[in-house]
Image (cartoon, coloured by chain):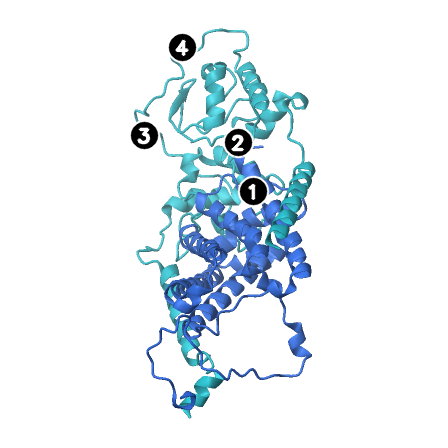
Amino acid sequence: MNTNDVLFGVVPYVAAALAIVVGIVRWRRAPFTVSSLSSQLLESRKLYWGSVSFHWGLTIILALHLLALIVPQGFEMWNGAPIRLYMLEISGVALGLWAAFGITVLIIRRFTSARVRRVTTGMDHLVLLVIAVQIISGLWIAIGYRWGSYWGTGVFVPYVRSLIWFQPKPEYVEPLPLVLKVHVLAFFAFLAIFPFSRLIHIVTLPLQYFLRPWQKVIANREPKSAEYVTNKPRPKQFQ
Amino acid sequence: MRSAFLLVGLVAMSVLVAVATGTSPPPIEAQGVSGADLYVANCAACHQVNGEGVPGAFPPLADNPRATDADYVATVVTDGLDETIEVLGEIYSSPMAPITGLSDSELDVLVEYVVEIAGGADESGAGDGNGDIVEPETPTAPLEPPTAGGIDAGYDLFIGQNRLDERGASCASCHTAGEVGNLGGSSLGPDLTDAYELLGGQAGLSAWLANPPSPTMTPIYSDRPLTQDEITDLVAFLADAPNQDRPSTNVDWLVIGGLVGLIVLLVGMAVVWRGPRKTYVETLRSK
């Protein structure tokens, strides 16, 4: 068993085990920590530009990755005509850039907003780092090793399926360029930190929203800065 | 609470490592595999089952004085070869990819087998100068064009317009060649425009495609080989590829298209989504 076998044959199972087992334990033992730890109340303008771009860009890209895993033949048939291949890949790059724009805004916000920085933990930094690596390597692959939506069906689909059927075939990954390996390993890192971080909010589907009566949340106090540093005059109704 | 998570995580991790390592198929041991089997699996695609090679494309191993040197054979198998060599009067310049995935004992058995078919098992002292690296003195004669196959049919197979019978990935997934693509073909694998010449014309390229020996392609095509008809058409297309005009790609339309898409999305955010909703406090303030 060489390094490649360990990284691409064992590490994925370790990461998946962490994600599933610790995720369930956390859900049962500390359900109130299963949250996105939103900081929207602390700062909302930058969050809008960062969060919407980041989440939509990334979710659509991720969904397309999963779709390729389920129906690779569909992608191969779609890509059989070059014009369709180019449309798909250009859309993918646009969505990737959207997500990259989003995470850039979110990273800047995390470091420049005093209130947000106050509630930031080391794990938040790690989450941003892992996802940033994921997005940058993904764009690098899309542009430098085109066309991923096409060769992915030959190289990565059989690899990921071999993992799912518990017969890992890490030899699919061994001859590939380094940046592809980084992209894959970053996903395993993502899985591993998922249950220990705010990433766990991915599995919280707010289904009860459909059943409960609506409510209006009203804050009746002036929002204060983290350290009372604001120099703005107090609005009239609060004086 | 956090330490409890960590503890559970560590236990789960060790259990899964045990499961994962236990369920992966055991490595093939050389004891149960003969040199001949390893040769057929790893070498015969190019050097042929009987070791006679393909003249002008892949050098013979049978009666090849270089292949009687076990150390040399082992080095070529593990590192590949990217030099022009002369074997039994023929010049060979096709690169050979390293053979990966062999254990040390398998390598020994394979090398022993190759040395044997080279006729070197009972001789000592090879290297009589017959295997020196040479620069080709004159450009080799132009290769014969292929005798069969359709260029257009090969193109359709190459780009995936027609899918391969065994459902292997189409060539354009990883490669480009000839006139393929306005945005350039795929750039994961090498450009195949010169593959016909590099791999020794019809015979060499056909042998290569029948059982592709590169480490990336072997796992993909070992279960889903190309049919003979497909190989014939693809060889015809690749033979024609150097004559085809490729649209010049000074501008990377993929990046430009992506940036345009990004701008459209951001404008959409500004216009359609109308930004963050005002908080109740902000609504009160603005009154």
- Between residue B126 and residue B147, name the one nearer to us: B126
For numbered disc 3, what is the local secondary structure? Answer: loop
Contact between marks 3 and 1 (CB within 8 A): the answer is: no
Measured as percent of width and height from the top left, residue B128 is found at 40, 10
Residue name at image x 65 percent, y 64 percent: A31
Which colour denotes chain A? blue
On the same chain, marks 4 and 1? The answer is no
On the same chain, marks 1 and 2? The answer is no
From the image, state whether disc 2 or disc 4 is nearer to you. Answer: 2
Measured as percent of width and height from the top left, residue B258 is found at 40, 64
Mark 4: amino acid: Asp
Distance, label 1 to label 2, CA atoms, is: 16 Å
Mark 2: amino acid: Thr
Q: Which residue is mark 1?
A: A8
Residue name at image x 67 percent, y 56 percent: A25
On residue B139, the disc is: 3
Q: Which residue is mark 2?
A: B100
Q: State which chain disc 3 sits on.
A: B
**Quadrant (top left, top right, bottom left, bottom right) of the C terminus of chain A:** bottom left
Distance, label 3 to label 4, CA atoms, is: 26 Å
Tell whether A79 sits left or right of B222: left
